């Protein structure tokens, strides 16, 4: 397969790799491939960059079969073969568990078990670096979701160390907008798998995505939100909440009816 990627894409990926120190010489990077558009593009772009980056790294792919019926993984195997990247498929019963339990927060639980399955595979193989296909819109959506639903100013990091598993997660696509990845889909030469999950498209993330889409009709709003994710943006925040005890002591001192 002849790979090509325009400057618009490589500039943003290389910027993320450089700024967040994502790849070092002799890294072996395991790409988490769901078969969706984001991780498929991630794999394609890393396979392309392999030839041109000033650091040497190797690649392999892990796909976690969540256990939904009727998913054909052969196109993924073929895609990896075309890119000359080893492909591993791990079968799990995560879907059965999630659907049976009608678990609260099914997406978070699924992501947790999926990550666990990948970490187990990495331990077996002695691999220390895992790449995920999260992009700029994912980061801003996560930031907004954490403000709205958990009152915290957090989002995922472009490079994250998981001490419990002694692995790094890297997200080389963090500077790419989702629409750019959709646009690049035609390079892949195969139709990304659509998600078999019944929760797909019905999540809080999807609501936020819709909301952001309407709200960020003014392009700058998206980038302002993204700027607010930076540490330096938090200088003018209110002080931390005092403990209940401290606050009632202060109120008692102050209020003497
Ligand atoms: N079944 C899986 N097996 C391996 N890796 C996965 C799997 N599902 C997701 N991932 C990895 O985790 C990342 C985030 O997962 P999420 O479910 O949010 O996917 P997404 O943003 O819809 O991406 P995609 O379009 O690749 O499915 C993906 O980009 C991919 O790298």
Image (cartoon, helix red, strand yellow):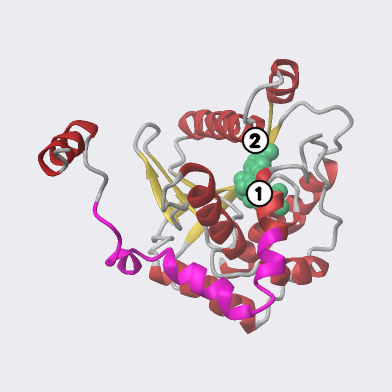
CB under 8 Å between discs 1 and 2: yes
In the image, taking residue 145 as reference, residue 206 lies left or right, namely: right
Q: In this view, does 246 lie above or below 17?
A: above
Q: Quadrant of residue 166?
A: top left
Q: Main secondary structure of the magenta part?
A: helix
- The residue range painted magenta reads 211-239
Q: Is residue 206 above or below residue 235?
A: above
Q: Tell me which residue sits at (66%, 49%) in the image.
A: 205
The answer to whether residue 87 of the structure is visible from this angle is no
- Badge 2 element: helix
From the image, tell me which residue sits under label 1.
Answer: 205
Of the pair 255 and 100, the residue shown nearer to us: 255
Q: Which residue is painted at 55% across and 50% down in the image?
A: 145
Q: Which of 144 and 93 is in front in this view?
A: 144
Residue 107 numbered mark, or none = 2
| Residue at position x 76%, y 26% in the image | 67
Point out residue 183 in the picture as x, y percentages from the top left corner: 77, 72
Which residue of the protein is positioned furthest toward the right in this rendering? Answer: 70
Question: Does the residue tagged 2 have its C-beta within 8 Å of any atom of ligand 1?
Answer: yes
User: Mark 1 vs ligand 1: CB under 8 Å?
Assistant: yes
Q: What residue is rendered at 71% in x and 55% in y?
A: 40
């Amino acid at each position: 397969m002849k790979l090509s990627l325009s400057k618009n894409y490589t500039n943003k990926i290389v910027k993320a790799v450089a700024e967040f120190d994502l790849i070092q010489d002799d890294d072996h990077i395991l790409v988490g491939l769901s078969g969706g558009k984001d991780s498929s593009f991630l794999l394609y772009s890393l396979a392309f960059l392999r030839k041109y980056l000033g650091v040497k790294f190797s690649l392999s792919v892990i796909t976690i079969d969540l256990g939904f019926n009727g998913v054909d993984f052969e196109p993924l195997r073929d895609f990896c073969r075309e890119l000359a990247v080893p492909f591993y498929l791990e079968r799990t019963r995560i879907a059965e568990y999630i659907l049976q339990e009608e678990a609260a927060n099914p997406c978070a639980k699924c992501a947790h078990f999926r990550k666990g399955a990948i970490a187990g595979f990495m331990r077996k193989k002695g691999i220390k670096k895992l790449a995920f296909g999260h992009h700029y819109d994912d980061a801003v959506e996560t930031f907004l979701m954490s403000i709205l639903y958990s009152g915290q100013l957090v989002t995922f990091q472009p490079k994250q160390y998981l001490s419990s598993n002694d692995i790094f997660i890297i997200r080389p696509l963090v500077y790419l907008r989702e629409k750019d990845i959709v646009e690049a889909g035609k390079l892949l030469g195969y139709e990304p798998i659509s998600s078999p999950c019944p929760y797909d498209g019905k999540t809080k993330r999807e609501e936020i995505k819709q909301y952001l889409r309407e709200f960020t009709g003014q392009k700058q709003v998206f980038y302002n939100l993204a700027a607010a994710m930076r540490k330096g943006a938090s200088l003018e925040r209110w002080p931390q909440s005092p403990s209940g005890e401290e606050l009632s002591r202060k109120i008692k001192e102050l209020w003497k009816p």
